[in-house]
Image (cartoon, rainbow, N blue to C red):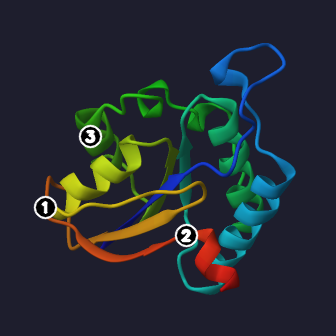
Amino acid sequence: MITLLLIRHGIAESSSISGSDRNRQLTRAGRDQFQMMADWLIENDAKPEKILSSPLLRAQQTAEILSESAELNFGEDQVCPWIGFGLQFDKLLSCLNESFQSTIAIVGHEPDMSSCTSRLVGGGSYRFTPGTVACIRFEDNIRDPFGTLKWVKNPEKLTA
């Protein structure tokens, strides 16, 4: 069985000092909120064995928070350009099917995370607010669209 965690990065600044969207950082609230989500994932048997991230700074910072909670190392080899805006779905499938880990987290952006979730489970409409995580399970290899959506959790619901 393979578990895929699709994660939208945490709350980010509305703009960066450099003016580049790619350099927008998580806000303090975004860091704190996603730390709660990362802790919830670990406590609820959704600890990833591998984390892959978009190259945009806010996604990498989100991945780093999760990697610390999961006691994993997060490095440059886990930053994937194909996860940035316009996620390359075929590349995602081949990367995941070549992995030996049973729980894999992908940290990316909207609308990619919601459309990817919909495609992997064969339909539905999903809204990923910052820090939202979807858990999809596959019996064997990850194929389009044969996953089972186990849950979608957003950080606001953790404190409610």
Residue drawn 51% across and 55% down? Answer: 7
Q: Which mark is residue 154?
A: 2
When asked about the image quadrant of residue 146, the answer is: bottom left
Residue 71 at least partly seen: no
**Nearer the viewer's eye, disc 3 or disc 2?**
2
- Is 135 located above or below residue 88 in the figure? below
Q: Amino acid at mark 1?
A: Gly
Left or right side of 80 for 15: right
* The C terminus - image quarter: bottom right
When asked about the image quadrant of residue 131, the answer is: bottom right
Q: Earlier in the sequence, mark 3 or mark 1?
A: 3
Residue drawn 71% across and 33% down? Answer: 14
Determine contact: label 1, label 2, CB under 8 Å. no
User: Within 10 Å of the Cα at label 2, are there few (<14), some (14-19), or many (20+) other Cα atoms?
Assistant: many
Q: Position of residue 158 (x, y in %)?
A: 64, 81
Q: Position of residue 107 (x, y in %)?
A: 53, 47
Q: Position of residue 136 (x, y in %)?
A: 33, 68
Q: Amino acid at mark 3?
A: Ser
Left or right side of 66 for 51: left
Q: Which one is nearer the viewer's eye here, 51 or 159?
A: 159
Q: Amino acid at mark 2?
A: Asn
Give the tally of numbered discs: 3
| Residue pointed to by mark 1 | 122
Q: Which mark is residue 94?
A: 3
* The N terminus - image quarter: bottom left
Q: Which one is nearer the viewer's eye here, 102 or 67?
A: 67
Residue 38 at least partly seen: yes
